[in-house]
Image (cartoon, rainbow, N blue to C red):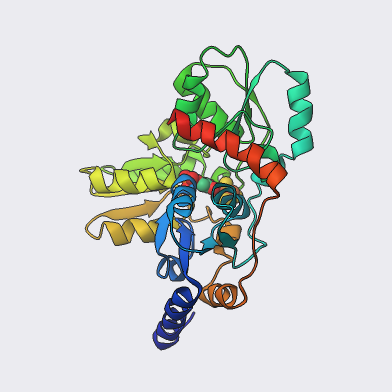
Amino acid sequence: MLIKKELKNLENKIKDLKKKRNAIILAHNYQLPEVQDVADYRGDSLELSRIAAQTDAKVIVFCGVHFMAETASILSPQKKVLMPDLNSGCPMANMLTALDLKKLKDKHPKAAVVGYVNTSAEVKAQLDVCCTSTNAVAVISALKDKEEIIFVPDKYLADFAEKNTGRKLIKWNGFCPTHVKIIPEDIKREKKFHPFAKAIVHPECLPAVVAMADVALSTSKMCQFAKETEAKEIIVGTEVGLIYRLKQDNPTKEFYPASEAAVCPNMKRVTQEKIIWSLEELKEEVRVPDKIRLRAQKAIDMMLKII
Ligand code: 13P
Ligand code: SF4
């Protein structure tokens, strides 16, 4: 643990380097507190990509996982998108390769192909439309005249979309290894301890967990819900890193993690020292080759048109 004075020195160094490089720092809501503290913006996958596309900064230090930095680079190819730790991957995104998807499409040639943003750029290049946890239901609803719909890679987000649209989807066997650690017993126990609390969960959770929650939302929608609800206590069924922001934004409310086991190690790889290294060396750059980028962008643009 860094002591306070050291942290201040690092924070000042990051401020100077940001100015020198004309850079901004984007941090996903699951990042370590020390990273969230130096971020210009915090957000969910969709929000961060949109900010990346809109900023005037020349350099974007993306503190999140690889597919998020790729999405930012797809939307803003003229900017330099850096990851302070290139090993921050998303195991769910890695459960589906471009070849896997090609084979699935060959089996269902007439199906529309929807893919969660938690996919590689190569996979996105094969989608008709992308979606996030915020808009999966809206995207599936917009495809009402399609007879068949493939939904990859998250089988639990697909299940959530099925329940909320009444559509049957062709699914892939992908899932988030962090969110499946939250089990129905966790929600039951926390509800028993905190009978007046609302339970909010991420749609990547097991369907049985989603069914027990008051509402299933993306990470930033959870932040919005926490601000707007009259409830003073909230059980949070997602990666534990979100609690830091929830507490900062709502100091008079209590937040209880549904499970302390819900930690995404990939989201914890970035530190302030790595951000300094990234800004000094301008590394590691994430760039998507044009051939893939242009096709992947079409799927993202289609999503942005729908929502
Ligand atoms: P959000 O888009 O809701 O932030 O989710 C991203 C993610 O990877 C959740 O595990
Ligand atoms: Fe991927 Fe799950 Fe980590 Fe999100 S929490 S980045 S879906 S492994």
Q: Residue at x 48, y 21 (%)?
A: 142
In the rendered view, would you say 227 is above or below 248? above
In the rendered view, would you say 131 is above or below 178? above
Q: Is residue 139 left or right of residue 247?
A: right
x and y, in percent, of residue 37 in the image: 40, 69
Q: Is residue 143 left or right of residue 3?
A: right
Q: Is residue 152 left or right of residue 47?
A: right
User: Is residue 242 at least partly visible in the picture?
Assistant: yes
Could you say which is closer to the camera, residue 117 or residue 34? 117
x and y, in percent, of residue 182 in the image: 51, 45
Label tally: 0
Could you say which is closer to the camera, residue 79 or residue 47? 79
> Within the image, what quadrant is residue 69 found in?
bottom right
x and y, in percent, of residue 17 in the image: 48, 78
Q: Residue at x 56, y 67 (%)?
A: 270
Could you say which is closer to the camera, residue 45 or residue 201? 45
Q: Residue at x 52, y 39 (%)?
A: 205
In the rendered view, would you say 149 is above or below 228? above
Q: Could you tell me which quadrant the C terminus lies in? A: top left
Could you say which is closer to the camera, residue 300 or residue 206? 300
Q: Residue at x 47, y 35 (%)?
A: 304
User: Is residue 120 at least partly visible in the picture?
Assistant: no
x and y, in percent, of residue 83 in the image: 60, 63
